Amino acid sequence: MIKLLLFSYLRETIGQEELAIEASNWTIAELKQHIEKTYDVALQQTMTAVNEQFATDATVLKDDDVVAFIPPISGG
């Protein structure tokens, strides 16, 4: 089981600050695909951190990992 932390519009769209997902041995790409299909959100521009370290879509997850999806920030 991994803990997925959500920020910004993802938190608002999904309606939760975090999710617990059985995603051990999935890659970040597989997790993103699952979240996109389940919650109808786009994650192409989203950065990912695993255990507070930036990670690539090829990173393989293991039990007890904490994953954060960090959407792009814009301002003016």
Image: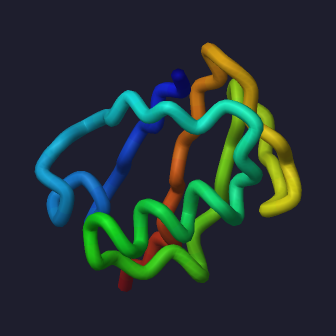
- Image coordinates of residue 55 in percent, x first then y, are 81, 49
- Residue at image coords 70%, 64%: 29
Q: What is the tally of numbered marks visible in this picture?
A: 0
- Image coordinates of residue 32 in percent, x first then y, are 56, 64
Residue at the top extreme of this rendering: 64
Q: Which quadrant of the rendered structure holds the C terminus? A: bottom left
- Residue at image coords 74%, 25%: 62
Q: Is residue 45 above or below residue 67?
A: below
- Image coordinates of residue 5 in percent, x first then y, are 42, 37
Q: Is residue 45 above or below residue 20?
A: below
| Left or right of 44, for residue 74 | left
Q: Quadrant of residue 51?
A: top right
| Left or right of 67, for residue 39 | left
Foreground residue among 36 and 15: 36
- Residue at image coords 79%, 35%: 53
Q: In which quarter of the image is residue 14?
A: bottom left
- Residue at image coords 83%, 58%: 56
| Left or right of 18, for residue 66 | right
Foreground residue among 12 and 23: 23
- Image coordinates of residue 37 in percent, x first then y, are 38, 74
Display colour scheme? rainbow
| Left or right of 2, for residue 36 | left
